């Protein structure tokens, strides 16, 4: 996409009313085309799912055999269409060439994540109604702030593929922390419906809970990091370093999402799926580390080859673990088939390279009189868990025949792995069409065949040695990098409402009352305490302020028409005493007694509240939710059988009781729901 990051007003500094805009959604770039195709497929899948739900309802309602036969026939067509649409969506997920660096490369492509799509959300009426009803303020004064929030959300649907796009997504995520505490009380919904489409199945998930919005934005932050990583130029040292950093940060964001939002009602954000995605991102970072080490060329030297053998064996090992994780339930049914096969191909390819490097050590480096035997024996022995029966490492290094036999055994194993990688690649239609992948695998296979052909063949009938597996080892440990939200500074759009510790959705206040204050002998008749806003303290019950309706514990929100919600004790006292003997009007509010706050019944967030489970809404009206109906647990996306007949008309949650658990007291801050040790929180 094209970069269109401009401020609301070019002359303004980064501050109030300033934020980056997203890319042009109509830009004719490869990435934007893929996202537009994804949006179209999501709508087609939604229509097909609704048709299936309607057909299933008719099937349950009718007793006419002829109608039932016709409905069953239509259901078979709908299920076939859904299967085709899912395959098309998988094709978009494996369109990795679009996201790679534009430079000519000869590297195996890396896999990025596509951004989750969402529908437009109109905050205007719900937030204005809430401001009027809950805060007793003129909601028309906040139209610009609401518009800024909606503009920022719209921009986040098309972020630029760079650090500016990441910063914009994080700023919206942090802004949602303020919005949640300002406008989303824990005991009820305010009527804002959030709809996000599953990245792998296209199935929509709809909730009135802001936590779905926050989790989806986090997923897109991780996805954008993967796109930044694949875009890096892997032919330069700096490009590879940036790629490693991007994939580690992507793994950190996805890991944070998995640990924090543990019950999101979307397959792509389930703990099992996120666990696989984290493994895949760390594996790609490890792959870039190996490329970084060998970027300047691999010297044909004994100890250098030993080091490279262990490094490349580590890459093959982590991809083997990724492939294993992708083939486990319940991830197996929703992960793109081509991703699993690509992980298998990379595992075989890098294992083959490990055996090729080992064979090169044995065939090209005979032990010379001036070489350090002990050092070579120690280094080479680290490649094996155990040596073949009847062989000793030092004896192999000294004996030319044994070296050649063991080297040829490693070459044979390398060729077997290369052939398996080519076979799997040929069986997968999506991967078969990636030319650079075919070229890399074929070139590596030919190199091993050529190396094997260069060795003597007279004693092949005596070569009964089986090459042992290579032990992996890396000097560059790859770990997920936790997201650093504190680096992005965000100002609350609704700062005018007052300090969040007081003016939040969790606390109820009376409408502002006007108190006409007269000073008596230079005394106010009360004291002030607290921060912002200040609170009435030690009120004299016979003073004029008490007679006018002032109460102990009231908060002063304005003095003489000047807003005082953000002023301290000294500043408010100065305003009160500056009027002298003239009466002054001030507005105060009182706290209303409310029942203990309850957790949201459709929460997907787990920190500090009971764990709840949310189900996916498939057959729903786009604008309304019938909250009186219940939904059964949704079966996997392709389970179109007769068991999955009940369709939900709303999102339903099943809270789980936690015996003996005590409710955690929460601080009223925009970051209450962040579980991190960062200094910001």
Image: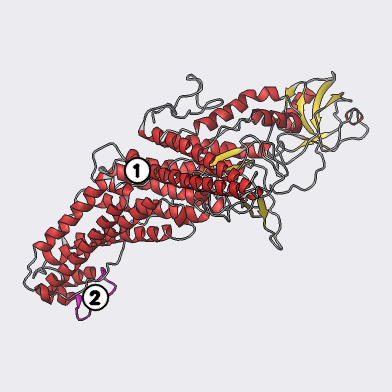
Estimate how packed mark 2 is, as few (under 14), some (14 to 19) or many (20 or more) residues with alpha carbons within 10 Å: some
Q: Nearer the viewer, mark 1 or mark 2?
A: 1
Residue position marked by numbered label 1 in the rendering: 96
Q: Is residue 311 above or below residue 595?
A: below
How dense is the environment of label 1, judged by Cα within 10 Å: few (below 14), some, or many (20 and up)? many
Q: Residue 618: give x, y in percent of width and height.
A: 58, 44
Q: CA distance from mark 1 to mark 2?
A: 40 Å
Q: Which stretch did the figure color magenta? A: 381-393
Residue, far bottom = 390
Residue 387: assigned label: 2
The residue sitting at 44% across, 50% down in the picture is 251
- Of the numbered discs in the image, which one, if any, rests on residue 192? none
Mark 2 falls on what kind of element? Answer: loop
Depth order, front residue of 664/416:
416
Q: Earlier in the sequence, mark 1 or mark 2?
A: 1
Task: Determine which quarter of the picture holds residue 308.
Answer: bottom left
- Identify whether 358 is placed above or below 422: below
Q: Say if residue 353 shows up in the picture.
A: no
Residue placed furthest toward the front: 66
Q: Residue at x 64, y 50 (%)?
A: 60
Q: Position of residue 226 (x, y in %)?
A: 40, 44
């Amino acid at each position: 996409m094209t970069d269109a990051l401009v401020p609301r007003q070019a002359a303004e500094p980064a501050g109030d009313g300033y934020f980056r805009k997203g890319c042009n959604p109509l830009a004719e770039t490869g990435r934007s085309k893929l996202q537009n195709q994804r949006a179209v497929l999501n709508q087609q899948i939604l229509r097909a799912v609704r048709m299936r739900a309607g057909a299933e309802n008719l099937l349950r309602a009718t007793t006419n055999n002829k109608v039932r036969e016709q409905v069953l026939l239509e259901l078979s067509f709908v299920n076939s269409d859904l299967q085709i649409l899912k395959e098309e969506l998988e094709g978009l997920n494996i369109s990795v060439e679009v996201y790679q660096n534009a430079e000519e490369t000869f590297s195996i492509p890396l896999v990025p994540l596509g951004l989750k799509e969402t529908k437009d959300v109109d905050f205007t009426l719900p937030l204005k109604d809430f401001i009027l009803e809950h805060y007793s303020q003129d909601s028309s004064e906040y139209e610009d702030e609401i518009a800024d929030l909606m503009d920022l959300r719209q921009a986040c649907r098309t972020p630029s593929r760079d650090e500016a796009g990441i910063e914009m997504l994080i700023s919206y995520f942090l802004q949602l922390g303020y919005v949640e505490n300002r406008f989303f009380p824990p005991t009820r919904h305010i009527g804002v419906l959030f709809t996000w489409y599953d990245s792998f199945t296209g199935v929509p998930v709809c909730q009135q809970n802001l936590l779905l919005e926050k989790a989806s934005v986090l997923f897109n932050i991780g996805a954008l990091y993967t796109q930044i990583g694949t875009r890096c130029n892997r032919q330069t040292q700096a490009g590879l370093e940036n790629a490693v950093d991007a994939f580690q940060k992507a793994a950190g964001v996805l890991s944070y999402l998995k640990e924090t939002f543990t019950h999101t009602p979307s397959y792509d954000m389930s703990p099992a799926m996120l666990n696989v995605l984290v493994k895949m991102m760390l594996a790609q970072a490890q792959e870039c580390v190996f490329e970084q080490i060998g970027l300047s060329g691999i010297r044909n030297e004994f100890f250098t080859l030993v080091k490279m053998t262990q490094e490349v064996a580590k890459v093959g090992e982590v991809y083997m673990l990724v492939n294993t994780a992708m083939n486990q339930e319940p991830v197996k049914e929703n992960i793109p088939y081509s991703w699993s096969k690509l992980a298998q191909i990379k595992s075989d390819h890098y294992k083959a390279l490990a055996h090729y490097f080992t064979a090169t050590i044995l065939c090209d480096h005979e032990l010379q009189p001036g070489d350090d035997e002990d050092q070579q024996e120690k280094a080479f022995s680290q490649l094996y868990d155990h040596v073949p029966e009847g062989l000793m490492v030092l004896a192999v290094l000294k004996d030319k025949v044994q070296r050649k036999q063991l080297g040829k055994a490693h070459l044979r194993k390398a060729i077997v792995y290369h052939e398996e990688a080519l076979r799997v690649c040929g069986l997968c239609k999506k991967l078969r069409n990636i030319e650079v992948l075919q070229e890399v695998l074929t070139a590596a296979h030919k190199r091993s065949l050529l190396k094997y052909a260069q060795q003597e063949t007279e004693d092949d009938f005596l070569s009964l040695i089986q090459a042992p597996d290579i032990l992996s080892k890396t000097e560059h440990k790859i770990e997920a990098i936790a997201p650093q939200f504190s680096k992005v500074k965000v100002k609350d759009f609704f700062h005018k409402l007052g300090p969040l510790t007081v003016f939040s959705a969790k606390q109820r206040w009376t409408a502002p009352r006007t108190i006409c204050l007269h000073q008596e002998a230079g005394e106010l008749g009360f004291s002030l305490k607290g921060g912002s806003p200040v609170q009435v303290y030690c009120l004299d019950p016979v003073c004029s302020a008490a007679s006018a309706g002032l109460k102990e514990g009231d908060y002063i929100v304005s003095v003489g028409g000047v807003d005082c919600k953000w002023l301290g004790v000294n500043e408010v006292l100065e305003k009160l005493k500056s009027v002298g003997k003239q009466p002054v009007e001030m507005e105060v509010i009182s706290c209303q007694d409310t029942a203990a706050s309850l957790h949201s019944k459709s929460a997907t967030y787990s920190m500090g509240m009971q764990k709840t489970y949310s189900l996916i809404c498939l057959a729903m009206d786009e604008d309304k939710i019938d909250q009186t109906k219940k939904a059964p647990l949704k079966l996997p996306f392709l389970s179109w059988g007769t068991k999955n007949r009940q369709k939900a008309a709303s999102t339903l949650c099943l809270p789980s009781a936690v015996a003996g658990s005590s409710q955690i007291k929460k601080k009223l801050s925009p970051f209450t729901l962040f579980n991190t040790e960062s200094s910001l929180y």
